[in-house]
Image: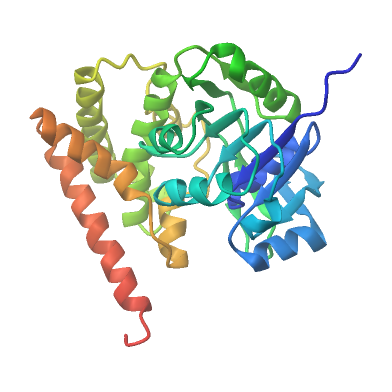
Amino acid sequence: MNPPERSILVIGCGAIGGLFAACLDAVARVTVFDVDPARMERVRNEGLCITGRTQKLARPRAVSNPAELRGARFDAMIFLVKSQHTAAAATAVLAAVSEPSLLVTFQNGMGNAEALVQSSSCSVAHGMTVEAARLNADGSIEHLIHGPSSWLGPVRGSLEDVQWLGALLDRGGIPTRTVADPRGAIWSKFIFNAVMNPVGALLGGVNAARYLSPEVCAVIDAMAEECLQLARAKGITLSSDPLEMVKKTRAGELPITRHGGSMALDLEAGRETEIESLTGYVVREALALGIPIPVTQTVYRLLKGLELATRIRNSPAA
């Protein structure tokens, strides 16, 4: 007998949210929620078109108003909105749906799992994904980086509570390791993002400049070491070298891609970045523990200035 079909709600239909929704749509009943009505109308009319490393056209149910989810039941709700919107998204959606069995974050940055724990009494899982994608102007999603493995584990609840979802992601084409304690993998990816994202944004999203400039490479290495000091102080054992892909790219073992990081894309689009849940988190935690982080703090301050400059440049009065 086949297992019952799972029902999944993906919250946030940007590049990664759309990619996860499209992959899961082949193995589950998927609904995608995003507050952008035009984006959801396009998904309803045209589907989710994935190009690049994955080629598929998925047609999940798409909604933009929480009221459309009234009384719906989901086995899992996967949050892939920007970190600064997690708490508000959880409040809005949970007020409409029947209590799900599992809340999941695959988001960048710290604080998302804690926000989900506070929003509900159900099981919560924290994941890390190495998938990278770009949302194109025509609504399609270009899958830029695939694998080798995403990680998933419980924050509240048991390993058994989340194993089925890891298996489902595997079947959908997102290789996933389900473990009892995912913090080592999460912190490895977190350090990569806390370092590479703001540097990429400061360089205008030109990824080659992160690898071909010796001065930028020195900044990246110094930031990574400061972040590693914080991880050690917190008792975190990393699952991998956060700069493994960076080092392989520098050595010519991997090609330099066109992906300059999500923070650069956010600035280009005039959106608020996730700097506070990434590099800002490192700065706050390190200062609280008395760990000197001069390079990371300087990059953080420069990115905050760039955010302000972008807002001023894009304001109607500019």
Q: In the picture, residue 195 is in which quadrant?
A: top left
What residue is at 54 percent from the left and 44 percent from the top? Answer: 80
Residue in front for this viewpoint, 290 or 41: 41
Q: Is residue 265 positioned above or below 223 on the image? A: below
Residue in front for this viewpoint, 180 or 76: 76
* Whether residue 143 can be seen here: no
The answer to whether residue 168 is left or right of residue 294 is right
Give the x, y percent position of residue 103: 55, 32
Q: In the picture, residue 176 is in which quadrant?
A: top right
Residue in front for this viewpoint, 14 or 91: 91
Q: In the picture, residue 131 is in which quadrant?
A: top right
Give the x, y percent position of residue 23: 73, 37
* Whether residue 219 can be seen here: yes
Q: Quadrant of the N terminus?
A: top right
What residue is at 80 percent from the left and 31 percent from the top? Answer: 27
Give the x, y percent position of residue 64: 65, 60
What residue is at 64 percent from the left and 52 percent from the top? Answer: 33
Q: Is residue 309 positioned above or below 202 on the image? A: below
